[in-house]
Amino acid sequence: MPLLDHFRSPAADKAPWTSIGTFWVTAIVRSLNRRLPDDGFRAFAHVYLGPMVEADVAEFEYDSGIGDRENSDGGLAVATRVVPAPVLTFSPHYPDEVEVQIRDTKKGMTLVAAIEIVSPSNKDREETRAKLVSKCIGYLQIGVGVVLVDPVTNRSANLHNLLMSELCGKKLPRLPDTPTYVSSYRPVGQDGDHTLEVWPYEAPVGHSIPSVPLPLRRGPSVMVDLEGTYLEALADNGFPPSS
């Protein structure tokens, strides 16, 4: 089954990307938990789609003073400190997080690897691209293995190439600037020498999705069946096998 373009018709008309991404993460978690070493490693889903702030404006009240207020019984209520009006108000942009986290349940749920499935909001502006790249760098700095899966076709930025630029300048060859790809990163440190092993692959629409290794911090690497889990996500969203 080739990778479909979930951001244009006809695939975009059958199911929203938010549903595809959520079911894909679930399928990856199920698959990994059958493959991970049976010594405390476990995969978990972490999905955050859009803002979660639900406070109504009417919940907030701004006043100019601080003092005691009379309660319904005629007595004085506890003194209330009234918050001043905000200095600045604007509409923030909260990028999606569609992630599989692998944790070591025998070592305090320590994060040992992460799979990032890119959403359009991760690529639509410079600051959100930089945020995801910085997140990946933060994981790699502490020895956490990372897999980056980018199926987004309606944004052209290549986050793997941006990550390589941040880590090593322009010394290493890049992937072609195609919007869809998969890549895996394994940080290795020994005797003060730090290296990064990288598996970058193109994943163009209309072709099968390559499997990649998922390196576990202080553990082995496990192959991630991106194609098989993607097929499960499609089936769960009503796509026929011949899509």
Image: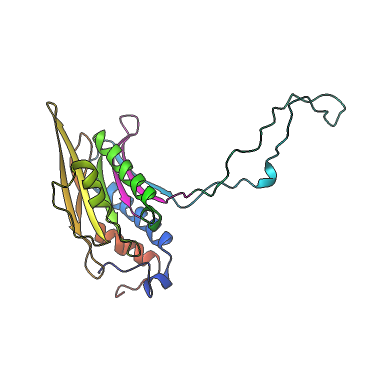
Q: Relative to residue 229, is residue 164 depicted above or below?
A: above
Q: Quadrant of the N terminus?
A: bottom left
Work out which residue is located at the far front of the displayed protein and give it.
87
Q: Quadrant of residue 43?
A: top left
Q: Quadrant of the C terminus?
A: bottom left
Magenta-highlighted residues: 93-118
Residue drawn 13% across the image and 48% down it: 172
Q: Relative to residue 204, is residue 183 depicted above or below?
A: above
**Quick one: 92 or 69, which is closer to the camera?**
92
**How many marks are shown on the rendered structure?**
0
Residue drawn 28% across the image and 52% down it: 159
Residue drawn 31% across the image and 38% down it: 103
In the displayed structure image, the side of residue 222 where residue 14 appears, left or right? right
List x then y, in percent, for residue 42. 31, 41
Q: Relative to residue 199, is residue 218 depicted above or below?
A: above
The secondary structure that dominates the magenta segment is strand
Residue drawn 85% across the image and 24% down it: 75
